[in-house]
Image: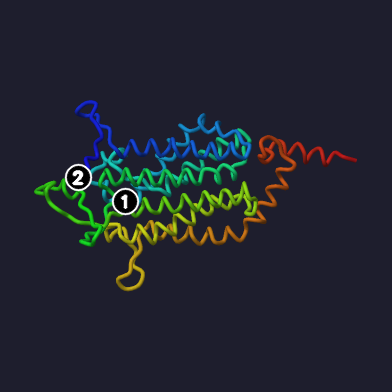
Amino acid sequence: MDPIAFAITDNLQIRWYGIMMAISMLLGSYIGAQLLKKIGRPGDLIWDGLVWIILAGISGARLVYVLTNISDFVAHPEEILRVDHGGLSFHGGIIAGVIAAYFYFRRHKINFIEVMDSFAPGVAIGVILVRIGNFMNGDILGFKWDGPWAMNFPYDEYHRMPGASQEDIILRHPTELYGLLVGVITFFVCYVVWRKIYIDKVLPRGANYITFVFCYSLLRTTIEDPFRHVSEQHRIPLFGSITLTYSQIVDIVLILVCIWAYTQLRKWDAARREVENRGSGFGGAESRQERRARQRAEKSKP
């Protein structure tokens, strides 16, 4: 499939990857806002801060991708800002987007844990749509393979090399579709966990965003990453011929952190509820100024 959806001018082209990225952000935010409203929170506030969260997420995703693939950009530094050509780190986007969202929702005194829980299913939908964009773009390619569902990507970087032709057949693992499957499974798991927290009330708050990180990291490192064509310079030797990519190393660390966090969730949730009982707003924790004022008032009591 041609990665270019349509061209406005010779130098201004709209790619399917960009379209899918935009849809993923809007749809993910809509799902998160609706889930927040179901638990009585002003979910529509997300639209006011969406631009800043998106800009932070894209910037963080591109920065981490460039830093972890720096050798690919040394010879072509002009490609660093070409997000439309693909190349975004999920981990970088999540970290930067979460930081931006934290400050935005804290300013509006909305419980950030509830925000993260409610946005987990929407982010999983975003993963699905972005992988569709990757598929159309012909990037995050898999290893060469001639198995029953192997695919050829005539617009990938290897078909653009000197002497190559789009007529050449290079069969590969369709890792974009493997990544799509990761997003589908993660979405259903996160939606079920969200209901267990806020509808059935059998799990503590915070369980869903930890589940998202755990589920996505586990599935990606086992279903998608082993089949991605990652150069040896971006791999770390483990045992003999077994190597791990940088992404898999990060995923394994995140999985271990999530396992530890699961053991602490009920204690953390109980502590947050105690603070919130003294707080104000939409279930948000009291601000630093409110806490100091309360402490001064308590000290001044005879």
Q: Quadrant of residue 8?
A: top left
Q: Residue at x 31, y 73 (%)?
A: 240
**Circle 1 sits on which residue?**
176
The answer to the question of whether label 2 and label 1 lie on touching residues, with beta carbons closer than 8 A, is no
Which circle marks residue 155 in the picture? Answer: 2
Q: Amino acid at mark 1?
A: Glu
* Residue 153 place in picture, x, y as percent: 21, 49
Q: Quadrant of residue 237?
A: bottom left
Question: SS at mark 2?
Answer: loop
Identify the mark nearer the N-term, 2 or 1.
2
Mark 2 and mark 1: Cα distance apart in space: 14 Å
Nearest the camera: 162 or 44?
A: 44
Q: Amino acid at mark 2?
A: Tyr
State the quadrant of the N terminus: top left
Q: How is the image coloured?
A: rainbow
Question: SS at mark 1?
Answer: helix
Residue 234's place in the image compared with 280, above or below, is below
Q: Residue at x 75, y 41 (%)?
A: 278
